[in-house]
Image (cartoon, rainbow, N blue to C red):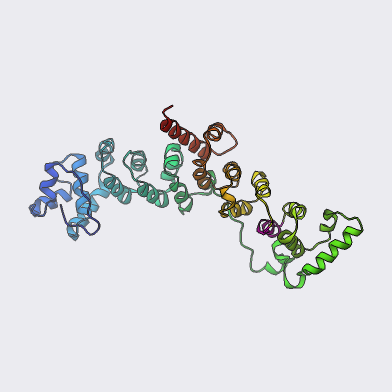
Amino acid sequence: MTQTETTTVRLKVSPEVARVVTSGAPRDAQLAAARGALPLSGKDLLTVLFFFCRSSDAELKKIAVHTLRHLPGSTLAPVLRDSTLHQQLLDLLVRVRIADAELMGSVVTHPSIASKTLRYLANKAGQDVLERLAGNQNLLRDHPGIIEAMIANPNADRRLKVRLGWHEPEPAPDAATEENQAEADDADDVNEDEAGRSQQELEALMAEADEDGLSKYQISLGLKVAEKIKMGLTGDKEWRALMIKQSNKLIQAAVLKNPRITDGEVLTIANNKSSSEDLIRMILLNKDWMKNYEVKKALIIHPKTPAPKAMRLVSMLTLKDIKTLAKSRQVSTLVSTAARKELELRIKKTGG
């Protein structure tokens, strides 16, 4: 085995390969092999190039990389039909030939490919290769990490990312119009000049309104944004129910930060298909709420839940709910496919 720059990899090689890559092999034979000039099978040639690409011998490495980069697809295609091909050879092909969409199409379906190789490919490949990855439901189901890698890939177009469960972030406000927008945008309505009444003043207002027979809804109509946020943070269940319906995201978020909010209220928010992406994200990040089975189930089918997170939650469902989810048309194909995969695994474990 040649000395390499990185971690040692042990491969079972043929006698033809061993004669070339061992440290005592003739120099002329090694150089010829690196150029692809020796009569080797496709698999043996790829194995030799793998060793030389990892070699500390700069000349051999440079020649081997050049040879691998220009090997015709007709030479590599039969090699990829070998199901016993080592995952490190596949990883090398991905890193050197990532621009070859046709070749990558064969690589990604190989049974030996490692998850880390798929993630690298998903994060670096061009649009053509990403389309092939996104169209392979089995691959997305078995390796959910590649979805996030594809979404993060700068080569992925918007259509593909949306298909994978990505939501376009709201654009940042234009610095030139930020001051004017502060008066129109709900999020900018909360400032020092309009901080609203203090908590004591609000309590006095509530008491007075109660004596006048005004409902909390009627009172809310006269509150400023900052005051509504205070009511979301400190109000009782009725106030929380009113404030969560506000269009202002800061007011909605305040409700979820209210220490008195119950799991039942959180479940109602999770079940509401119109709940914003921000609210869903806040629920997903709360460990206590995520212990609630019904909340998890609601988030799996919620359209604003990122597909990778929904897919991870599928394994936490009961067999009955997984069966329902596998047939559901209310969720993305990625989630229903993940449910079918989980169902298959459960059936295998129980033997029926």
Q: Position of residue 145 (x, y in %)?
A: 44, 48
Quarter assignment of residue 187: bottom right
Quarter assignment of residue 227: bottom right
**278 displayed left or right of 18:** right
Extreme residue toward the bottom, this view: 193
Q: Nearer the viewer, residue 279 or 333?
A: 279
Q: Position of residue 142 (x, y in %)?
A: 42, 40
Is residue 25 in view from this perspective?
yes
Extreme residue toward the top, this view: 352
**318 displayed left or right of 98:** right
Q: Position of residue 221 (x, y in %)?
A: 83, 57
In the rendered image, the vertical position of residue 62 relative to residue 179, given as above or below: above
Q: Position of residue 267 (x, y in %)?
A: 65, 46
Q: Nearer the viewer, residue 222 or 32?
A: 222
Q: Nearer the viewer, residue 32 or 242?
A: 242
The residue depicted at 75 percent of the width and 62 percent of the height is 225
In the rendered image, the vertical position of residue 3 relative to residue 145, given as above or below: below
In the rendered image, the vertical position of residue 122 relative to residue 336, given as above or below: below
The residue depicted at 75 percent of the width and 56 percent of the height is 236
Q: From the image, give the main secondary structure of the stretch colored magenta.
A: helix
Whether 256 is among the magenta residues is: yes
Whether 150 is among the magenta residues is: no
**208 displayed left or right of 166:** right
Number of numbered discs on residues: 0
**347 displayed left or right of 171:** left
Is residue 196 in view from this perspective?
no
Q: Nearer the viewer, residue 250 or 175?
A: 250
The magenta stretch spans which residues?
Answer: 248-259
In the rendered image, the vertical position of residue 114 relative to residue 318, given as above or below: below
The residue depicted at 49 percent of the width and 41 percent of the height is 315
In what quadrant of the picture does the C terminus appear? top left
